[in-house]
Image (cartoon, rainbow, N blue to C red):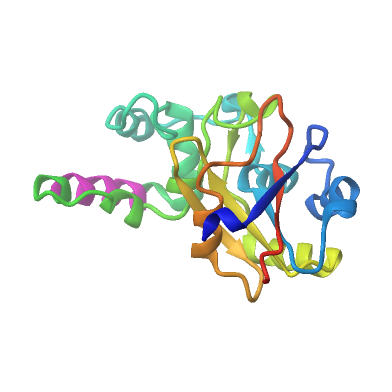
Amino acid sequence: MLDNYEIIPVPTRILTIHDNIVEAIIEYGADKIGPNDVICSAESVVAITQGRAKRPEDFKPCFLAKVLSQLFPSRGSIAGWNSMQSLMDAEGKYRVLLAVICGFFAKCFGKAGVFYQMAGEQARLIDDVTGTMPPYDKHIVYGPDHPEKVAEAIKLATGCYGAAIADVNDLKRSCVLGVSEGVDPRLVEKILIDNPFGNASQKTPICIIKNYKK
């Protein structure tokens, strides 16, 4: 069933805080968008255009951030002092501390994922340095603000069937953060599972699911 969906990557230049994601989609993808299509944007690009990227040196990690960051795998997005501090700034340090404690005891009883359920949305969405496209691979990037409103704005401006903001990687992790009305987020996650986005040298942070509405 999923093989029936054609995905068209949309090349762009590097998008920055000076860009508007809706205007960029129109500029680079208008000639490829049809009325039955769903436009998908990588969540990190939406966040960057919203100004939600910060340099690591902008953070002043507290003692608690330094301690808790050591409890996470070294390749994780909150394993660094600054990225852990960024999470505490976004969600509150006591919430993060409580989530760590509860997550530890839950793991002792064989239940995983409790920390990410309790620590707030940004615990899943923060990208540490090297986690996104150059030149923002030197930044810590928060998850996007109001992704559903962004998706609705994309739909309204382009005349497409719908839009989605998604967090997808090459490890077959696909998570839709926000969609416009009428779009099934679980179906879009399955369609995007092989990560059609190219956030590095490909510069294709936008893609179009052709004829989503059959």
- In depth, the one of 161 and 88 nearer the eye is 161
| Location of residue 152 (image quadrant) | bottom right
| Residue 202: image location, x then y, percent | 71, 29
Looking at the rendered structure, the number of numbered marks drawn on it comes to: 0
Provide the major secondary structure of the magenta segment. helix
Q: Residue furthest bottom?
A: 182
Instruction: Answer yes or no: is residue 176 visible.
Output: no
Give the left or right position of residue 84, taking residue 35 as reference. left
- In depth, the one of 79 and 148 nearer the eye is 148
Q: Is residue 21 magenta?
A: no
State whether residue 35 is above or below residue 8.
below
Give the left or right position of residue 93, taking residue 49 as reference. left
Residue at horizontal 66 percent and vertical 33 percent from the top: 199
Residues drawn in magenta: 94-105
Residue at horizontal 57 percent and vertical 44 percent from the top: 142
Q: Residue furthest left?
A: 109
| Residue 121: image location, x then y, percent | 46, 54
Q: Is residue 95 magenta?
A: yes
Instruction: Answer yes or no: is residue 110 visible.
Output: yes
